Image: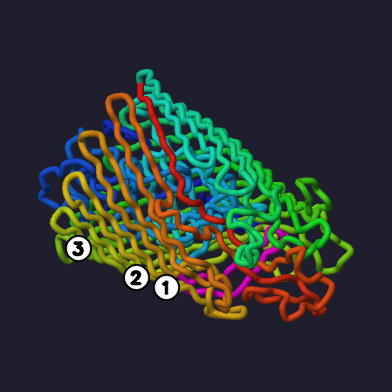
């Protein structure tokens, strides 16, 4: 059956793509586009006077246009002059409000205290990124009531190239962003919810696409340094040769972090991009990059030891934890467009390696050697994406039609070993995985009048999972862990926008989305998991602009997830639980106080509950309930820029029955920078108040050497300071369920000097 479906999809793709190419053939003079058009999820905006982000421009305010500057169009405007037909501004599909979509440009990023790649992503309203056990590991992501771990329910891409890793050794959707150089990023495109036909796997809570620059106005050399033996250097050059634009960037860095056991995180990044303008309306780009990183980790330490005073807040139990990773990328993109047609295409291939040494349970499994593990992931991945868009008018109706295809293939080798002092002891599992996905989507946007617009879309995804378990025990009946399985999912989308007043837009969103599950759990013979976990999202909201200075957006949203699945990498298995429902409220505000001073506020309130088959309680563990981000920023015409930002996340349950709580945290960061001629200096301060907080937090059952042996029942005092004891079926002690955490950084001062030439 799966082969028949795959053949049908393939045939359909072979018919659609040539058709798209035929209609995209230019019949008129192409309009110049100063930069490449993105693949997913954003489209070029036809109104140059509209700003893509809610954050005000740090420039003197221009004279008001006849229409409000930031109000989304409810009907396509007459074509602008040829020299203004396309601009460098790109934004998400209209009619979404900022509560669902937002584009953040480089200008806004320059007003943020950014010390690492994860800081870039915090510009997304409601998104919290948490550094997890040191600098080399992927961040933990929290958005819209999801603790998405390392990326299970948030799709991340760089110029359309996927960052999330399917069937990863450390967790489904693992999204390591350390191979991205912050200075490369021109804008960040943010969408929330499963309402976008262009987006597929992992775009449950939302999706983020980081768009790189095609060139630089100035070459530069930058040096950054500060606390914790941190040093970072970036060199960038952008020579131009006629119609050829180039960008070459190199980055190197080292940091020990605040930990008693220095993290010794060292990394390098190389990036090169060449863009050739084939004609005024078409261009082709090729990009290559290479990353390597190596680090020691702080680990996840048990709170009971810290509270008892036997372990320092920045201490660790296993000083050998850490790892290394690398990634190489090659991509080729092509774009072609005129007033009515657009065609974008992307092909990419990547090589990725990963090794992580961890010890989550300490001495529960092995009281002698400890419970250290080594997770390994080696893979090649490649894929294709293409999108065709056509705009046309019939009588009083305006149509904006899109069709797209995508394909991805991963060839993976995963492994899990028990280890001690970074030396392997025994193998646990080894898998060879071949995972393929194909997708076809179509979207139609119809403007019925100046105040009513409707978007409908349909997406079809097919996944194939092929797993070979090298340690499979075929002698055990029914215990097969190798196999082949396929699955298909249809995802309808719909959006309605009503603009009853010139400065107010009301919108309703509906959409079905999904995230794929780990291939090893999908093919196993006993209790296999659902290949594709569907989700149903719905949202109502409003957006308005007042006095040409104040932008407000708010939405009420819901998300029903078919099941909560977690890949337990340290045990080589998938844990599943029942269906969940998330309800939330989001508010965003942007205020231009004066021409050079701006304020912003992002506020989210979420509630996540199990609706069926809950465990010991109905709460979804680690789901954020409250987040806030607010800031005051300034940018003067004299070269001075500064910001003061406040971010926070409230306390949340660490277990379903809320027996354990993950601590909330509230941080204040500051930044100031000044440029004079060809030199620029900057100073950023993270955690200005030197708050002591726990960053990544989990409920973990672990055992210390000093605690009762595992081969005997636990005494009443087995787990001090409120953690609860866990026992096995035989009544013997397994360990104490407690909060294990990675400490957040204390006050961190970093200075930076940049020379332009």
Where in the figure is residue 312, as x and y percent of width and height? Answer: 61, 57
Where in the figure is residue 223, as x and y percent of width and height? Answer: 45, 30
Image disc number at residue 556: 2
Residue 579 is inside the magenta segment: yes
Q: Measuring 44% from the left and 73% from the top, which residue is drawn there?
A: 607
**Nearest the eye: 328 or 316:** 316
Q: Which residue is mark 3?
A: 504
Name above or below for residue 238 compared with residue 164: above
Give the structural element (helix, strand or loop) at label 1. Answer: strand
State yes or no: discs 3 and 2 in contact (Cβ < 8 Å): no
Image disc number at residue 329: none
Quarter holding residue 33: top left
State yes or no: discs 1 and 2 in contact (Cβ < 8 Å): yes
Residue 155 is inside the magenta segment: no
State yes or no: discs 1 and 3 in contact (Cβ < 8 Å): no
C-alpha distance separating marks 1 and 3: 24 Å
Q: Is residue 13 visible?
A: yes
Tell me which label, 1 or 3, sits earlier in the chain: 3
Q: Which residue is mark 1?
A: 583
**Nearest the eye: 338 or 142:** 142
Give the structural element (helix, strand or loop) at label 3. Answer: strand
> Among all residues in the image, which is located at the extreme right?
475
């Amino acid at each position: 059956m799966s082969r028949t479906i795959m053949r049908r999809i393939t045939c359909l793709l072979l018919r659609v793509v040539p058709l798209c190419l035929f209609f995209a053939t230019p019949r008129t003079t192409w309009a110049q586009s100063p930069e490449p058009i993105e693949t997913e999820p954003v489209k070029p905006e036809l109104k140059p006077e509209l700003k893509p982000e809610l954050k005000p421009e740090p420039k003197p305010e221009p004279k008001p246009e006849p229409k409000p500057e930031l109000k989304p169009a409810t009907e396509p405007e007459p074509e602008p002059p040829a020299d203004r037909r396309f601009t460098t501004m790109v934004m998400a599909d209209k009619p979404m409000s900022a509560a669902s979509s937002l584009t953040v440009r480089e200008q806004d990023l320059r007003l943020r205290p950014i010390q690492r790649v994860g800081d870039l992503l915090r510009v997304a309203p409601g998104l919290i990124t948490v550094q997890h056990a040191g600098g080399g590991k992927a961040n933990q992501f929290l958005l819209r009531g999801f603790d998405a771990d390392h990326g299970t329910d948030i799709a991340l891409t760089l110029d359309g190239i996927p960052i999330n890793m399917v069937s990863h050794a450390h967790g489904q959707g693992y999204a390591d962003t350390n191979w991205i150089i912050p200075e490369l990023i021109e804008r960040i495109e943010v969408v929330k919810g499963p309402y976008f036909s262009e987006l597929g796997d992992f775009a449950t809570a939302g999706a983020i696409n980081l768009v790189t620059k095609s060139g630089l106005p100035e070459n530069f050399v930058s040096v950054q340094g500060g606390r914790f033996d941190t040093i970072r250097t970036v060199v960038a050059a952008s020579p131009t040769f006629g119609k050829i634009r180039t960008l070459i960037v190199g980055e190197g860095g080292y940091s020990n972090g605040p930990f008693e056991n220095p993290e010794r995180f060292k990394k390098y990044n190389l990036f090169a991009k060449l863009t050739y303008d084939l004609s005024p309306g078409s261009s082709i780009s090729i990009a290559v990059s290479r990353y390597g990183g190596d680090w020691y980790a702080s680990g996840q330490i048990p709170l009971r030891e810290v509270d008892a005073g036997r372990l320092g807040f920045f201490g660790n139990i296993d000083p050998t934890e850490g790892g290394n990773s690398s990634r190489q990328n090659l991509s080729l993109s092509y774009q072609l467009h005129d007033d009515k047609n657009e065609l974008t295409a992307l092909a990419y291939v990547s090589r990725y390696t990963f090794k992580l040494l961890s010890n989550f349970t300490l001495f529960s499994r092995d009281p002698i050697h400890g419970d250290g593990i080594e997770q390994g992931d080696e893979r090649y991945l490649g894929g294709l994406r293409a999108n065709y868009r056509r705009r046309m008018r019939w009588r009083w109706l305006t149509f904006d039609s899109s069709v797209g295809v995508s394909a991805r293939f991963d060839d993976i080798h995963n492994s899990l070993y028990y280890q001690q002092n970074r030396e392997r002891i025994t193998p646990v599992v080894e898998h060879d995985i071949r995972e393929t996905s194909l997708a076809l989507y179509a979207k139609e946007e119809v403007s019925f009048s100046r105040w009513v617009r409707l978007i409908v879309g349909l997406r079809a995804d097919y996944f194939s999972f092929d797993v070979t378990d090298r340690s499979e025990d075929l002698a055990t009946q029914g215990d097969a862990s190798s196999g082949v399985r396929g699955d298909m999912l249809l995802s309808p989308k719909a959006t309605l926008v009503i603009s009853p007043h010139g400065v107010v837009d009301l919108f309703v969103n509906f959409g079905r989305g999904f995230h794929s599950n780990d291939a090893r759990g999908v093919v196993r013979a006993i209790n296999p998991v659902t290949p594709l976990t569907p989700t149903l999202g719905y949202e109502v909201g409003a957006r308005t602009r007042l006095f040409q200075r104040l932008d407000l957006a708010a939405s009420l949203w819901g998300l029903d997830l078919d099941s909560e699945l977690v890949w337990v990498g340290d045990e080589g298995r998938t844990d599943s639980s029942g269906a969940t429902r998330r309800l939330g409220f989001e508010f965003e505000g942007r205020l231009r106080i004066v021409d050079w001073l701006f304020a912003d506020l992002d506020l989210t309130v979420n509630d996540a509950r199990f609706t069926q088959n809950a465990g010991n309680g109905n709460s979804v563990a680690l789901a954020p309930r409250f987040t806030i981000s607010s800031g005051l920023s300034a940018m003067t015409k004299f070269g001075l820029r500064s910001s003061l930002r406040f971010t926070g996340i409230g306390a949340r349950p660490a277990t379903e029955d809320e027996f354990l709580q993950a601590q909330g945290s509230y941080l204040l960061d500051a930044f100031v920078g000044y440029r004079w001629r060809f030199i620029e200096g900057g100073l950023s301060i993270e955690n200005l108040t030197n708050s002591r907080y726990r960053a990544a937090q989990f409920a973990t059952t672990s055992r210390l050497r000093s605690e009762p042996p595992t081969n005997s029942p636990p005494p009443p005092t087995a787990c001090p300071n409120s953690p609860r004891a866990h026992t096995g079926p035989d009544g013997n002690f397994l360990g104490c369920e407690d909060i294990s955490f990675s400490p957040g950084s204390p006050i961190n001062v970093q200075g930076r000097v940049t020379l332009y030439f």
